[in-house]
Image (spheres, rainbow, N blue to C red):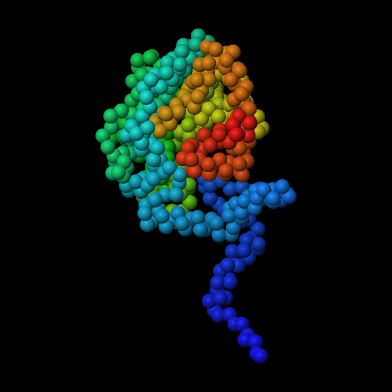
Amino acid sequence: MTVKKKTYSFHHVVALIAIGFPLLISLLKSDDRPNLVGIVISDEKPRFSMSSWLDGSYQAEKEDYNNDHWAFKEKMVRLNNQFYYKTFNQIRVNNFVSGKDNYVMSEGYIFSAFGDDLLKEDKVTDQLTKARVLQDTLKKKGIDMLLVFAPGKGSMCKEFIEDKYIHPVKMTNHGLFTSNCKKLGNNYLDLYTYFEKLKPTAPHPLFSKFGHHWSYYGECLAVDTIIKTIEKLHHTDLPDIHWDSVEVVDSARFRDADVLASMNLYSNPKQNMKLAYPMVQFEADTMKNRTRVLTISDSYWYGPVYMGVDQSCFAGGQFWYYYNKVVPSPRDVPVEVWELDLKTEIESNQVIMLLYSDGNLPTFGSNFINDAYELYTSPKTYYVRNERKKQIQAYAKQIRQAPGLLKKSTQKSKDLNITLDSAIKNDAMRMAGFIK
């Protein structure tokens, strides 16, 4: 009996190479971390233990790690994103969409522009009433409080929004906040309306195609207006911002293409928009730079921080990002607001400024107003509640600083269609034992 010799066809060889090639590359490649923006990658390899093996957690974490670090991860993600962008005009950035003429913007900011996220008016009046009490309380201590309403890209670029989002506007959160500020006597600056008036005659774009925030040019105008407003409110003289020349280029700088970077495309589209970049200078007068301003804001204030406003004009005042991250950190390690004494921090400033864009008005102040109001009107209950809050925040900070934990919270936010902060808080409460 003769045994038939097994032969392999060309197709078998090709299939074997295709299956084994990525593994071979992964073994030979020294740095397999994908260079992708906005995607949480865990660099810590799972540690094997008998308990993790038996409960299946090691296998799951190892699979997740290998998925993040396989040789062609970056290239495949970029090619996939390129396909969706070119074929369907879709961008693979969470909650962002591509509109007319390649304008990209947050879907949430589109909803804000048309009042689809409208709050109940009693909720707005409750917040602003507390803010007015806080404003009067701080004024007695020589501290002024200013609320600033910044324009969102959806509101300022409606002509580039896809038709499916467009409908008549009855009321927006911006309208509710500004009208109630007038009634209650809150100190406020309406940059939203200011930009609306500027737009028809502005010599340069106030928003860029591939940026989420106002353009650098718009940012400079906003900073100049904020400085003048604080000078009038606090009866002080701050260092001025000025520029003698403006450079106009067709390639976005700074944050004018921050969404484009997050799109993680294989080949970026050509930028055909002329953008302006003032050659900014700050008045170098240390005698004027004595009014310390604490800014509580969303990501809109990161631009002025990079510009140097806090150091050059606000006497080294801090920026509390969403009333959470302290910028710059007062220590050698990252610090969050809950780790500081709120009363001491507030009273070390001469001006407290809350600046939020219209897309974030539903969470205006990120709970700062509620905390500060309770601190000054009912300190006993504030400190009791704050102790419980600290336990949760300690775990939340741990999650934000551990890529593996952060990735799980990020996935939960997508699965449950909730904000990342809500998912982190939920996980932190579970870690603290407050929920099961």
Q: Position of residue 144 (x, y in %)?
A: 48, 16
- Give the side of residue 422 with respect to residue 171, left or right: right
Q: Position of residue 184 (x, y in %)?
A: 38, 14
Residue closer to the observer: 156 or 239: 156
Displayed quadrant of residue 339: top right
**Whether residue 135 is visible:** no
Residue under the point 37% across and 24% down: 120
Q: Is residue 159 above or below residue 1?
A: above
Residue under the point 28% across and 35% down: 200
Displayed quadrant of residue 23: bottom right
Pick the quarter of the image with the C terminus. top right
Residue under the point 53% across and 37% down: 423
Q: Position of residue 261 (x, y in %)?
A: 48, 47
Pick the quarter of the image with the N terminus. bottom right
**Whether residue 260 is visible:** yes
Residue closer to the observer: 8 or 166: 8
Residue closer to the observer: 98 or 375: 375
Q: Position of residue 413 (x, y in %)?
A: 50, 40
Displayed quadrant of residue 406: top right
Q: Residue most toward the top?
A: 140
- Give the side of residue 132 with respect to residue 2, left or right: left
Q: Residue most toward the bottom?
A: 1
Q: Residue most toward the right?
A: 50
